[in-house]
Amino acid sequence: MATSLKAVLSSVSLFLIPVFSEAGSFAFHGLVSSESWLPRAPVALSATGEQLIEDASRLPTHWDWRNVSGKNFVTVDVNQHIPQYCGCCWVHGTVAQINDRIKIARFGAFPDVMVSRQALMNCVEGPDAFAPGCFGGDSWMIYKYMYTHKVPDETCAPYRAQNDKCEPSTICRNCKPPPAFVTAIKAGKNATEILALGIDMTEECYAVPHWIGYGVKEYGAVSGELSMMKEIYARGPISCAMDASDDFMLRYAEIVQRHDGVFVTDEVSDTTDHVVEVTGWGITPSGLRYWVVRNSWGTYWGQAGWFKLRRGVDQLLIESNCTWSIPDIGDARFIPEGRILGDYVSGIAIMPEAIASGLAAQTWNARLRSWVALLTVAFSSAVIGAIFAVTLYRARQQPSQAPLLG
């Protein structure tokens, strides 16, 4: 996707104006609304949380997808600002929800899926056919893209915190060892000598044509405390816009210590600039209601990357603008069946069910043979041990003979 320098600078300037024009603003987190150019047309084919739970009394006092009867249904935490600062909370706050809803839909089965944030940054376009990436966007842009395009997981395109072109090699890639590197290794050169050669380690990188893809088949909006709780409880976490104020960003730990571990402020927010994932709620012993929220600033911020925010008062505008999605796991449904096999160059292939069943049967037979062998060894060891024990016992029962003295 070719983009002129003028277009890039124009797009960047639109995002930077509000960052430095307001006194006291500390950072640009990445939320830029697409409402002016992208219609808010939800795709809702199944019952929403609001429809599934009409009676609010069914909602529990506490709910947290990190601990449902002792089982965790959320994926790993990340940091949008590593390896460099990047205003892409809109990607992180949305992808976290999609990842976790995939995990919930699969009942926590192996493997945990981490949809590629970098592939989305490279390919999700703004109003001018330019992928804004670190310059900001919102959840609706991601839903629109994933509704018509599958996206690979992180192993295809690891997060780099920078904008790139949208092409096959930036969506899913792999690399072979460069010939000069192989020659140097075979010649016995050490690390210092190899580095001095200045070998381009990306020389043999290439696009992988076939990979496991994930999409979105439904999406929509939700707002208000009870509606949010119903959607979260019935179908999974949601993504919400919020005002990541300077107090929230820089003084979270200081403030929550005065409010039972919950962020509380009397400051009135008038705009949102951040996207986060809301996964549950609760109430403190003192009666303070709160949301359970995942951030994207690393586990050294907040409560291991998470935070509690006062609930029911639209604190930091968290209850005003939220979204949900229903993931499409596509070919991933074949993973538990063992029907996906791939090679180093071309990627995955989906085997017919009969072949997969045959391999599964071979695997089962191999395991059965292993178990039989282990049981045989264990039984033999037990028999030998018993014989030794009996022999030792009998020997101890015989009267000892005194040595002959001459």
Image (spheres, helix red, strand yellow):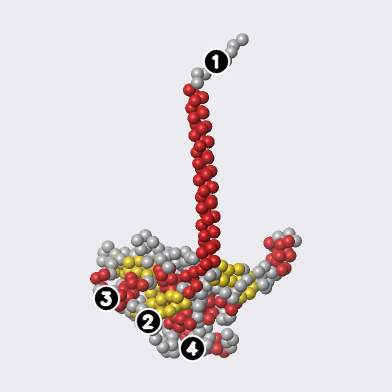
Q: In which quarter of the image is residue 283?
A: bottom left
Which structural element holds mark 2? loop
Report the Cα–Cα distance between label 1 and label 4. 104 Å
Whichever of labels 2 and 4 marks the residue nearer the N terminus, that label is: 2
Report the Cα–Cα distance between label 1 and label 2. 96 Å
Q: What's the residue at 52%, 39% (across, down)?
A: 381
Report the Cα–Cα distance between label 3 and label 1. 94 Å
Rendered-image quadrant of the C terminus:
top right
Is residue 84 found left or right of 234 in the rendered image?
right
Q: Which of marks 2 and 4 is in front?
A: 2
Report the Cα–Cα distance between label 2 and label 3. 17 Å
**Residue type beneath disc 2:** Ala
Residue 9, which numbered label?
A: none
| Residue beneath disc 2 | 44
- Residue 306 appears at what percent x and percent y? 40, 67
**Residue type beneath disc 1:** Ala
Nearer to the camera, 7 or 336? 336
Residue 54, which numbered label?
A: 3
Whichever of labels 3 and 4 marks the residue nearer the N terminus, that label is: 3
Which structural element holds mark 4? loop
Report the Cα–Cα distance between label 2 and label 4. 24 Å
**Residue type beneath disc 4:** Pro
Residue 402, which numbered label?
A: 1
Residue 127, which numbered label?
A: 4
- Kindly give the residue lying farthest to the top in the view shown: 406
Whichever of labels 1 and 4 marks the residue nearer the N terminus, that label is: 4
Nearer to the camera, 390 or 105? 390
Disc 2: CA contacts within 10 A as few (<14), some (14-19) or many (>=20): some
**Residue type beneath disc 3:** Glu
Residue 246 can be seen, yes or no:
no
Which structural element holds mark 1? loop
